[in-house]
């Protein structure tokens, strides 16, 4: 993708350069190798996958990772928090501009950054807790860097899980479509051939004939039941309590139990360690990081 970077070289004036890089981090590394100090980076040319996955409307939600990364870079360059937010607001559009403007207004009214972030539901509780701890230790850029590293690791693990799941899910989807085609189109037509045959039919042929009769007489009911099953799956995916029960059942399944438990607990340990290292007392850190655990593991946490 094409990345536009605001940079400074030596004691010269700030300038804008364009780089070709697969990510913002790679673009920043290229600029540093060329002797620049990077103030901020933003993507100006996206690949097809990014265009499909990123909302295109101007009212799209703020990208938390990009916002925190740009804020950290501006703070490292020597700007104050209010100055950094003002610079980011000028280059933002839609909801992003409104959120940054509200943060800037809260800071100018005397509130701390953590309190201002709390007023915006788009920011995760972990980020708010880390920023609150940095206000006691005066290391906001380092805190934001730790949050970005945490998010990078979580995204990497999530990407690996999704990549590993695509092939079996694709096989299950194609296999299900093939089975539906066989059950509702092919088998009833083959059953007509068996009905015209004389003599004792094997059990498989008798079963096929019986199924064709069910489809012929109660096809509507069968399709309604299948639709109800699909709706039930959708409701299960949309209901947190049902999702928790399903996840609990998956966690109890021996082949996946250890791996999923290790993934969720590693994420929980890392978040708790970040909060404690940032100066938050352990009881409060545990309360904040417990939200990262699924409901099935929270009693054990």
Image (cartoon, rainbow, N blue to C red):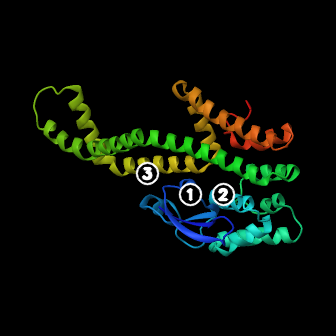
Q: CA distance from mark 1 to mark 3?
A: 44 Å
Please state if 4 lies on the left or on the right of 144 as rendered.
left
Q: Residue 176: horizontal and vertical position, in percent?
A: 35, 42
Name the one closer to the observer, 200 or 268: 268
The label shown at residue 251 is: none
Q: Earlier in the sequence, mark 2 or mark 1?
A: 1
Residue indicated by mark 3: 227
Give the labeled residue for mark 1.
24
Pointer 2 with pointer 1, Cβ within 8 A: yes
Find disc 2 in the rendering and name its residue. 69
Which residue appears at 57% of the width and 29% of the height? Answer: 259
Q: Nearer the viewer, mark 2 or mark 3?
A: 2
Mark in the foreground, 1 or 3: 1
Which sits in the foreground, 235 or 264?
264
147 lies left or right of 138: left
Dot 2 falls on a residue whose secondary structure is helix
Q: Earlier in the sequence, mark 1 or mark 3?
A: 1
Residue 87 is situated, as x and y percent measured from the top left of the image, at 70, 71
Residue 89 position by quadrant: bottom right
Residue 92 position (above or below residue 142)? below
Label 2 Cα neighbours within 10 Å, binned few <14 / some 14-19 / many ≥20: many
Q: Are marks 1 and 3 in contact (CB under 8 Å)?
A: no
Spatial CA span between label 2 and label 3: 45 Å
């Amino acid at each position: 993708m094409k990345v536009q970077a605001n940079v400074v070289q030596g004691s010269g004036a700030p300038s804008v350069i364009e780089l070709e890089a697969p990510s913002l981090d790679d673009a920043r590394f290229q600029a540093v190798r060329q002797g620049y100090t990077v103030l901020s980076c933003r993507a100006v040319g996206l690949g097809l996958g990014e265009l499909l996955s990123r909302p295109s409307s101007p009212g799209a939600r703020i990208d938390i990772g990009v916002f925190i990364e740009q804020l950290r870079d501006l703070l490292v360059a020597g700007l104050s928090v209010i100055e950094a937010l003002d610079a980011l607001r000028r280059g933002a559009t839609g909801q992003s501009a409104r959120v940054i403007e509200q943060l800037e207004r809260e800071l100018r009214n005397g509130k701390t950054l953590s309190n201002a972030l709390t007023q915006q539901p788009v920011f995760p509780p972990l980020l708010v807790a880390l920023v609150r701890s940095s206000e006691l230790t005066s290391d906001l850029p380092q805190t934001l860097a730790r949050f970005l590293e945490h998010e990078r690791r979580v995204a990497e693990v999530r990407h690996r899980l999704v990549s590993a799941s695509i092939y079996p899910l694709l096989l299950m989807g194609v296999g299900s479509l093939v089975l539906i085609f066989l059950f509702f189109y092919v088998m009833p037509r083959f059953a007509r051939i068996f009905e015209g045959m004389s003599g004792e039919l094997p059990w498989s042929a008798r079963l096929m004939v019986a199924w064709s009769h069910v489809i012929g007489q109660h096809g509507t009911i069968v399709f309604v039941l299948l639709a109800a099953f699909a709706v039930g799956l959708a409701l299960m995916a949309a209901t947190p309590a049902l999702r928790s029960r399903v996840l609990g059942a998956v966690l109890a399944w021996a082949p996946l139990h250890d791996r999923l438990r290790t993934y969720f607990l590693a994420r929980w340990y890392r978040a708790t360690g970040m909060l404690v290292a940032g100066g938050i007392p352990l009881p409060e850190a545990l309360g904040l990081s417990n939200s990262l655990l699924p409901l099935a593991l929270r009693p054990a946490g």
